Image (cartoon, grey):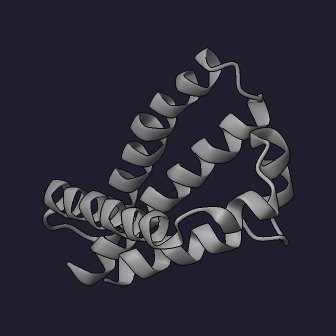
Amino acid sequence: MVSVIASMALGFIWYSKFAFLKVWQEDTGMTDEKMRSGNMTMMFGGMIVMVVVSTIGMALLIRTGNLEASLAVGAIVGFGVTAARVLPQYMFAQQPNRLAMMQAINLGVGITLTGAIIGAFNP
């Protein structure tokens, strides 16, 4: 649960007006009005379910270990697998490079954070 809350907090900060919201909106064509018109229950509910699923997957992958080892696994999965797989999707979709990097780094940091939290709670 701590990992899910931390991932949500990271997302709220990452895509806030103080960080990358405007860049994300420019690169995706999203407006404040269009964002408000979406089904927030579906979007946030789906996001929570997917974060829970990925956290369970990371916990099964890590199982036991110390903080350093879990952090390393999180970084490898976050940046070496997830971010590396996300970038080509944006490239083929001919999306802006800064959008691709912003998304990939967010995922990498989030999964690394998940690994660290799992390690901290499973010494």
Q: Looking at the picture, does residue 34 appear above or below residue 10?
A: above
Query: Which of these two is toward me, 48 or 1?
Result: 48
Left or right of 107 on screen, residue 53? left
Left or right of 81 on screen, residue 118? left
Q: Does any portion of residue 123 appear in the rendered image?
A: no
Residue sitting at 29 percent across and 57 percent down? Answer: 54
Residue sitting at 58 percent across and 42 percent down? Answer: 104
Residue sitting at 26 percent across and 83 percent down? Answer: 121
Q: Looking at the picture, does residue 72 appear above or below residue 29?
A: below
Query: Which of these two is toward me, 117 or 87?
Result: 87
- Residue 118 drawn at (x, y percent): 29, 72
User: Which residue reaches farthest front?
Assistant: 37
- Residue 72 drawn at (x, y percent): 38, 54
Q: Could you tell me which quadrant the C terminus lies in? A: bottom left
Tell me where residue 66 sits by quadrant: bottom left
Q: Does any portion of residue 103 appear in the rendered image?
A: yes
Residue sitting at 59 percent across and 67 percent down? Answer: 11
User: Which residue reaches farthest top?
Assistant: 92
Query: Which of these two is toward me, 54 or 24?
Result: 24
Q: Looking at the picture, does residue 96 appear above or below residue 64?
A: above
Tell me where residue 57 sits by quadrant: bottom left
Query: Which of these two is toward me, 122 or 48?
Result: 48
